[in-house]
Each structure stands twice: as C-alpha cells, then as structure tokens.
Amino acid sequence: MEQFLAVAVAHFLALLIPGVDFFLIARTATASGRRNAGGICVGIACANGILIAAAFSGLSLISTPAVLRVIQAAGGAFLVWIGIAFFRAEVSVELTDQPRAGRIGWAKSLGLGLASGLLNPKNVLFYVSLAAALSDAGPVSLMLYGAWMVTIVLAWDLLVAVALGSRHALAKLSRVLPWLTKAAGGFLAVLGLGMILTLVTEPIR
C-alpha cells in the first residue's frame, strides 16, 4: 500500500505540471469543443498506456541513449510544429451550438493526442525512471499501477477538457484566448527548438 501511494502521488504531481498535452487539450476544447477534446484525451491516455506497458515490461530499448535521442528529436519537431500551428491559428470563441467549419474531427483529435503522448520525452523519461524504481514489484502490482495511471491520466484530461469546453469557460476566455493561444504556441515552439539544439550541441554517447 505504501508503494502504491508513493506511485500514485508521484504520478499525479507529474500530471499537474502543464505541458504540451495540457495546451493541446485546452486549445482543442476552446476551439473545437469538448467532444473533439475528448478525442485528444483518449489519444493521450492510449499513448501513456503504451509507454507504461513498454517500461514496465522491461523493454530496455526505450532507455538506450540512441533511442532517447531519436525520441527527443521527434518530440522537439512535434513541439515546434504544434507551436507554429497554435501561433498562426486565428482563434475566436463562438457561444453557439452550431458546428464551426474547419475544426478538426474526433478521429484526427485522437491521432494528435496519441502523437503528443508518444512524442513527449517527459512521459518517456518519467515512466522509464518509475519502472526502474519499481524493479522489485511483481507483475500483478505493475499491471495495477499501470491501469491506475492510465485511468487517472484519462480522468484528469477529460476534466480539463470539460472545464475549458463549457460555455461559461468560453465566455471568460473570449478576450484572452487569442493571446493565450499565441503565447502557448511560442512557448511550445521555443521548447521544441531547445530540445533539438540540445541534441545538436551535446556529444553523442
């Protein structure tokens, strides 16, 4: 029980730190509604499940320096792409139930969420580190931990999507959303460039 509480607290605290997943959910919820943001959430949860299964099953490939460099490069490029898309987006809030032309569908949202989760180096490093710390746990315990974390990821992300996709939240965000979107886009693009520059400047091991 103590080990489970430690895992649950560490995972939830890591989940509270806003990152690309949070910005992607917030942007989709405010621009395309809660349903499409739900697709992002499901994709992110699936990606977390894949990474957890890989780390907890003892798949050491993802912890090798060469593979981590590839993941970091792909993640950096993904952040730059998402950041530019956010920065260039013309965002407006429409307090209407009518569908808006040009917004992404649920299937595409699912794909974006999956890519965001899989290409986020923070997720990879966190689960690899957690797996190392749980090396003495049995298979059943690891399965329970993994199921718990995927469930919490999905529940928390859906809560964010619902909160930011409500009419009340949209009304409050109507004035600041364009600036928030551009600020988030700039932040993500700079973060992605920083990841790529780190790979270029650090020696290959």
Image (tube, rainbow, N blue to C red):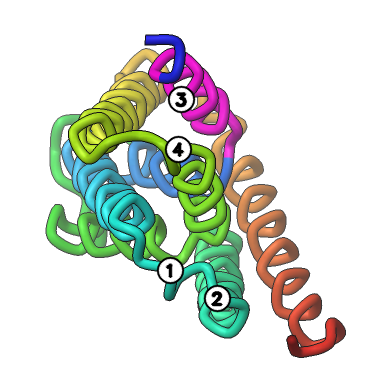
Amino acid at pointer 4: Leu
Q: Is residue 82 left or right of residue 28?
A: right
Query: What stretch of residues is rendered in magenta?
Result: 4-18
Q: Residue at label 2?
A: 64
- Tag 1 secondary structure: helix
Residue 173: numbered disc:
none
Residue 127 % position (x, y): 46, 48
Query: Are the residues tagged 1 and 3 within 8 Å (C-beta)?
Result: no
Q: Residue at label 1?
A: 60
Instruction: Identify which residue is drawn at 41% across, 59% down.
Output: 116
Instruction: Identify which residue is drawn at 34% across, 37% down.
Output: 29
Q: Is residue 7 magenta?
A: yes
Instruction: Identify which residue is drawn at 51% across, 65% down.
Output: 82
Q: Earlier in the sequence, mark 2 or mark 3?
A: 3
Q: Is residue 91 magenta?
A: no
Q: Residue at label 4?
A: 134
Query: Are the residues tagged 4 and 3 within 8 Å (C-beta)?
Result: yes
Q: How many marks?
A: 4
Query: Are the residues tagged 1 and 2 within 8 Å (C-beta)?
Result: yes
Amino acid at pointer 2: Thr
